[in-house]
Image (cartoon, helix red, strand yellow):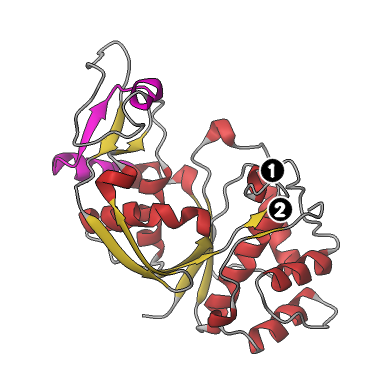
Amino acid sequence: MSYRGRFAPSPTGALHFGSLVAAVGSWLVARHRGGHWLLRVEDIDPPREVPGAAERILAALPAFGLDADEAILFQSRRGDAYEAAFEHLRYAGHVFPCWCSRTELAAHGGLHRDGQCIAAPDPSRPPAWRLRSPDRTIHWIDELQGPQAENLREVAGDFVIRRVEGLWAYQLACVVDDGFQGVNHVVRGADLLESTARQLYIQELLGLSHPGYLHLPLVLDAEGRKLSKSEKAQPVDPSDPLPALRRALAWLGLTVPEATTPAATLAEALAAFEPAALRRSSLTDTRTL
């Protein structure tokens, strides 16, 4: 099967430097392997989304030379697929309703374990739905960060796949859509490294293939926070894309070409690209981004 990778932004704001780094990194790996680079908009959390952000992100990417190879997938239109996956898990007994609040869980270590709820069922309000996490260690090899291992029960606990409001959780939607799009390699930020074990487990329960994973280090602000969580996460400028594109390549640890257009810059970077050359550790970028 040919390589199929993706970039999957959430429309919580315009495209910022940290997201551009992830987009460029995933594009380079896909092109290096002669494969397809897909785009997916993860717009399943309306309370956090900014009106018009998805359109601005999708309009900005081509200015940096980043064009998807297939039609863009919007998660907001995929509810039936998530419902089908949820029913499959429920029928098999892998999920259960839960009325526990974060406050109640915090008093018991913050994690929900062994399907044992602290709060009693409350028919007057809807529950969240959690996936039972077994006492099992998941092992995998990250192509940049190396061997990984996580005990699901101890690290993740029984985790939510459908929220109280009826919204689908990221872990389920991500797995279902990677399967639907045929994604066989995931390049994304290292903040999602801890999600990988949960997603590998869901893939197993749904009978889906496991993709490979490569987690890029994060761009941090001066206080050490992920840039997307920082007030310094200003949008990159698609009307003047070369400065941010060159800086993204440099931040990834790559040689920056002297080309004068985004397309030529990416072409020259790709010609010299080897995934092993990518930076492995997160760095602080103290400039205004």
Q: Position of residue 10 (x, y in %)?
A: 57, 47
Question: As shown in the figure, which amino acid type bears the numbered disc 1?
Answer: Ser
Q: Position of residue 101 (x, y in %)?
A: 36, 22
Structural distance between the alpha carbons of marks 2 and 1: 11 Å
Res 195 label: none
Give the residue at x 59% y 72%.
27
Q: Is residue 141 left or right of residue 73?
A: left
- Depicted 32 relative to depicted 141: above or below: below
> Mark 2, residues whose alpha carbon is within 10 Å: few (<14), some, or many (≥20)?
some
> Mark 1, residues whose alpha carbon is within 10 Å: few (<14), some, or many (≥20)?
some
Question: As shown in the figure, which amino acid type bears the numbered disc 2?
Answer: His
Q: Position of residue 9 (x, y in %)?
A: 57, 53
Q: Is residue 71 left or right of residue 100?
A: right
**Stretch in magenta:** 83-106
Give the residue at x 24% y 28%.
97
Mark 2 or mark 1: whose residue is earlier in sequence = 2
Task: Report the number of discs.
Answer: 2
The residue lying furthest to the top in this view is 124
Q: Name the secondary structure under disc 1.
A: loop
**Of residues 144 and 228, the one drawn nearer to the viewer in this rendering:** 144
Residue located beneath label 2 in the image: 16
Mark 2 and mark 1 residues within 8 Å of each other at the beta carbon:
no
Q: Quadrant of residue 109?
A: top left
Q: Position of residue 143 (x, y in %)?
A: 44, 74
Can residue 3 be seen in this snapshot? yes
Res 230 label: 1
